[in-house]
Image (spheres, rainbow, N blue to C red):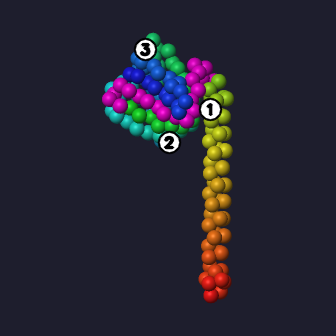
């Protein structure tokens, strides 16, 4: 099976002869073996692990993304950011923690942006109501 992990700027992993892949989505961890049925899921911020033909295990931290399995032989993960390192402790302690922190910051920024938009809409609605109640158009 071929495993590709890609970001908008790079192909981080392009390995042939992968015998097993382990990943995580919102429902939890799962595994994929060669000849798996076509599959599509949204990944969580997590570590993807895979075994090569020699039995060695490799790891890549991904910042969410989309995993797709096609034809039982092509597994592709498209993600915003990925870091490959065969030292699981390094990925778990530093990279994964940073990805989660970045995701939390982005979530907070989205919430604040939504609040600003709603406040602007309320101001516009107040202004429009005051015009109807005896403002310039009466």
Tell me the SS state at disc 3: loop
CB within 8 Å, label 3 to label 2:
no
CB within 8 Å, label 1 to label 3:
no
Q: Which residue is mark 1?
A: 96
Compare marks 2 and 1 and give the one earlier in the sequence. Answer: 2
Question: Is-magenta flag for residue 105?
Answer: no
Q: Which residue is mark 3?
A: 53
What's the CA distance linking mark 3 and mark 2?
29 Å
The answer to which of 34 and 73 lies nearer the viewer is 73
Which residue, as the protein is rendered here, is positioned at the far front? 136
Query: Is residue 49 something one can see in this rendering?
Result: no
Q: Which residue is mark 2?
A: 26
What's the CA distance linking mark 1 and mark 3?
26 Å
The magenta segment is 70-89
| Residue 113, image quadrant | bottom right
Tell me the SS state at disc 1: helix
Query: Relative to 61, is 104 above or below?
Result: below
Q: From the image, which quarter does the N terminus lie in?
A: top left
The answer to which of 130 and 93 lies nearer the viewer is 130
Q: Residues within 10 Å of mark 2 (few under 14, many from 20)?
A: few
The answer to whether 108 appears left or right of 75 in the picture is right
Residue 55, x across and y down, in percent: 46, 14
Question: Which residue: 62% across, 73% down?
Answer: 125
Q: Residues within 10 Å of mark 3 (few under 14, many from 20)?
A: few
Compare marks 1 and 3 and give the one earlier in the sequence. Answer: 3
Tell me the SS state at disc 2: loop
């Amino acid at each position: 099976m071929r495993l590709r992990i890609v970001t908008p700027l790079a192909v981080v992993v392009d390995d042939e002869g992968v015998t097993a892949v382990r990943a995580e989505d919102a429902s939890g961890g799962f595994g994929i073996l060669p000849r798996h049925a076509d599959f599509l899921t949204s990944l969580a911020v997590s570590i993807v692990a895979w075994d090569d033909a020699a039995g060695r295990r490799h790891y890549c931290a991904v910042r969410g993304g989309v995993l797709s399995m096609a034809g039982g032989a092509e597994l592709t993960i498209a993600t915003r950011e990925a870091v490959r390192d065969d030292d699981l402790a390094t990925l778990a302690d530093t990279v994964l923690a940073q990805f989660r922190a970045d995701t939390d910051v982005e979530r907070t920024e989205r919430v604040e942006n939504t609040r600003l938009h709603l406040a602007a809409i309320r101001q516009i609605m107040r202004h429009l109501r005051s015009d109807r109640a005896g403002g310039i158009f009466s």
